[in-house]
Image (spheres, helix red, strand yellow):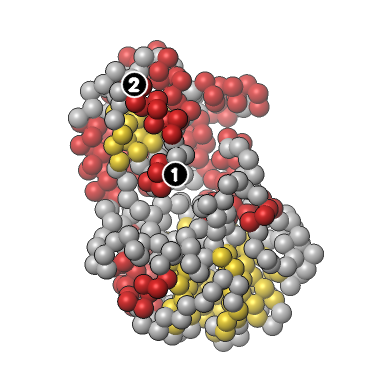
Amino acid sequence: MRACIHRGSKQIGGSCVEIEHEGQRLLIDLGLPLDAESNDSQYLPPIGALDGSDPSLLGILISHPHLDHFGLLAHISPSIPIGMGAAARRILSAAAPFLPGNWPIPAPGWDYETGQSFATGSFRITPYLVDHSAYDAYAFLIEAGGKRLFYSGDFRAHGRKSALFERLVANPPGGVDALLVEGSSLGRLGADEHFPTEAEIEAQLIQSFSATDGLAMVHTSVQNIDRIVSILRACRKTGRKLVIDLYAAAILEATENRNLPQSDWPDVALFVPRAQRLQIKENAWFDLLNKHSKNRIFIETLQSVAKQSTVLFRPLHRYDLEKGNCLEGASYIYSQWEGYWEQGMYDDLRSWLERNNIKKQSIHTSGHASPADLKTFVASLAPKKVVPIHSFTPERYPEMFAHVEPHHDGEWWEV
């Protein structure tokens, strides 16, 4: 078995790895680069048969539903089988109608069950559910020709599913010949430092909500389910109700996990901003709206209960909240990667906040393992070689791990 990192040996995002054995091939992830100006086919790596013309390409294994790992599926043949967690697949389908541009809906293929192996061609794949900011994220053990390659995907040990990390390092697969391990945190934290836990994020949210005289607005990815749980828990402890929009309601329903917040919970309310009302009318989404309207509120009600409410905020809420006089004493919490803000993606939002005299707070933690947890992870798997991926600083790997074997993008190497 041999492998080639097509993108990711020296960068975060846009991940794509090709595995080959006896003329048969698998891809692991097909991500859109983080610095891509749009979701365009020009970013496809130089891989043969993405048009479905060559049966030697058995399929593509997607580790998790973040665009930097699956986004370029929009530009390949729908005849190529796609592996993905079943919940992740449902989430992407639920999100698609709300999102502009080339939002991929993965073709049918394999639905993962953690620890349950499946075979395709000469490959045997075992997915492992991991703790990550994307819901339903997986690492993979791939076996062929007597060799074992482990692909970490994106993972962490400080989220609400940290038990998955503890379980894997306590009982790792043995005999790993090559470990492709992400290193997103290298260069961001010291070797023994840790990111805040999701429980610590919850505590910070409680403090912020308690200090807010009016409406609390938390700007986070709707698909960061861990964060939504933290927000709701903080709401409960501060006497607030969580206000979600129809997009969030559809995503939460798509998890099919009734232990996660849902639109019909008594401490959750549905508010449909103007932009979504237009979408509903244009696309005749009346059944979807009715499904989630048990606890629907309108702007007049939101204005009257602002002090007891927290909005799961997106920029499309600005018009409604301002016109509805909901911003007196309001707070804004930014709970995403700071790079989006620094790169100017939210410059219009920044101006809106300044105009309404609302200060930005940042309460967030990474979706990626800290250096200390990376060391624990690699030591537990004890691979014969460690191959850097998903890191801007692969040169840091030898400081952290033994048996490091870096490879360039486009370079084939023996597992």
Secondary element type, mark 2:
loop
- Answer with left or right where residue 333 lies relative to residue 71: left
Q: Where is residue 295 in the image (x, y as percent from the top left)?
A: 43, 24
Q: Position of residue 100 (x, y in %)?
A: 61, 37
Which circle's residue, 2 or 1, is located before the other in the chain? 1
Quarter in which the C terminus is drawn:
bottom right
| Foreground residue among 5 and 305 | 5
Q: Mark 2 is on which residue type? A: Asn
Residue, disc 1: 343
Q: Mark 1 is on which residue type? A: Gln
User: Mark 2 or mark 1, which is nearer to you?
Assistant: 1
Secondary element type, mark 1:
loop
| Foreground residue among 174 and 276 | 276
Mark 1 packing: few (<14 Cα in 10 Å), some, or many (20+)? Answer: few
Q: Residues under labels 2 and 1: Cα distance?
A: 22 Å
The residue under the point 34% across, 21% down is: 356
The residue under the point 27% across, 68% down is: 191
Quarter in which the N terminus is drawn:
bottom right
- Please report contact status of discs 2 and 1: CB closer than 8 Å, yes or no: no
Q: Image height check: is 234 above or below 170?
A: above
Q: Position of residue 305 (x, y in %)?
A: 31, 18
Residue at the right extreme? 53
- Answer with left or right where residue 200 lies relative to residue 258: left
Q: Where is residue 231 in the image (x, y as percent from the top left)?
A: 32, 38
The residue under the point 78% across, 68% down is: 54
- Answer with left or right where residue 352 lies relative to residue 101: left
- Answer with left or right where residue 190 lies relative to residue 351: left
The label on residue 356 is: 2
